[in-house]
Amino acid sequence: MSQATTVRVLFVCMGNICRSPMSQGVFERLVEQAGLADRIEVDSAGTHAYHVGKPPDPRAQEAARARGYALHAQRARHVQPEDFQRADYVIAMDRDNLAALQEICPPQLQGRIRLFMEFSELYRGQDVPDPYYGGTRGFERVLDMVEEAAQGLLNEIRRRHRM
C-alpha cells in the first residue's frame, strides 16, 4: 500500500451504545498516541437500529471517562451496506454480531470482518461481553478487553500497511 493510504476501522456491536463506542474511543486515542491519526480513521456502528442518533450509554461514558477516553461526541448509527466497501477492518464484538455482519456483507468483502478478540493475546477466542444489562464492573471488563486487543489490532495494521 502507498504511503498516502488511509486505513479505515469500523467497530460493531449490537446497538452501538456500549462496546463499539468504547472500542472506538480507545482505538482513536491509541492511534493518536502512535502519531497515525492522519492515516487511520475510526468509526463504530450497530447491527441493530435500536439507538440510532443517541449518545453512548452513560455507564459506558463514565467508565471510559475514568480512563481518559471521551465518547460524548459519538452518536449511534446502524451498519450500512457501504460500510463494507469503505472499511478495511470491520471488527465485531462477538460471534452474534459477526454472524449478522456476515449475513449482510457482500461475499467478496467477507475477509474484512473479524472478531475483535482475534487481536488479543489475553482474551483470544472470547467474545466481548455485552455490559448493557449488568453493573459497572461489566463496563470495566469491556474496557480491559478492548484496551488489550486494541494494541494488537494497531500492531496488525502497522505491520500489514507498513506504518
Image (tube, rainbow, N blue to C red):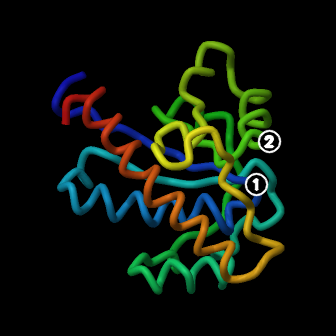
Q: Dot 1: within a 10 Å radius of its alpha carbon, few (fewer than 14), some, or many (20 or more) residues?
A: many
Disc 1 or disc 2, which is closer to the eye? 2
Percent position (x, y) of residue 123? Answer: 56, 48
Gap between marks 1 and 2, in whole Å? 9 Å
Instruction: Give the labeled residue for mark 2.
Output: 96
Tell me which amino acid carries mark 2.
Asp
The dot on residue 82 is none
Mark 1 or mark 2, earlier in chain: 1
Tell me which amino acid carries mark 1.
Met
Instruction: Give the labeled residue for mark 1.
Output: 14
Name the residue at 63% across, 73% down: 139
Name the residue at 47% across, 84% down: 65
Name the residue at 55% across, 81% down: 63
Q: Indicate the secondary structure of the residue bearing disc 1.
A: loop
Q: Are marks 1 and 2 in contact (CB under 8 Å)?
A: yes
Q: Indicate the secondary structure of the residue bearing disc 2.
A: helix
124 and 26: which is toward the camera: 124
Does residue 147 appear left or right of residue 74 in this picture?
left
Percent position (x, y) of residue 131? Answer: 73, 69
Residue sitting at the far front: 122
Percent position (x, y) of residue 21? Answer: 57, 64
Percent position (x, y) of residue 20? Answer: 60, 58
Question: In the rendered image, which quarter is residue 61 located in?
Answer: bottom right
User: Can you say which quadrant of the picture contains the N terminus?
Assistant: top left
Question: In the rendered image, which quarter is residue 129 located in?
Answer: bottom right
User: Can you say which quadrant of the picture contains the C terminus?
Assistant: top left
Q: Dot 2: within a 10 Å radius of its alpha carbon, few (fewer than 14), some, or many (20 or more) residues?
A: some
Determine whether 114 is above or below 150 in the image.
Answer: above
Name the residue at 58% across, 74% down: 140
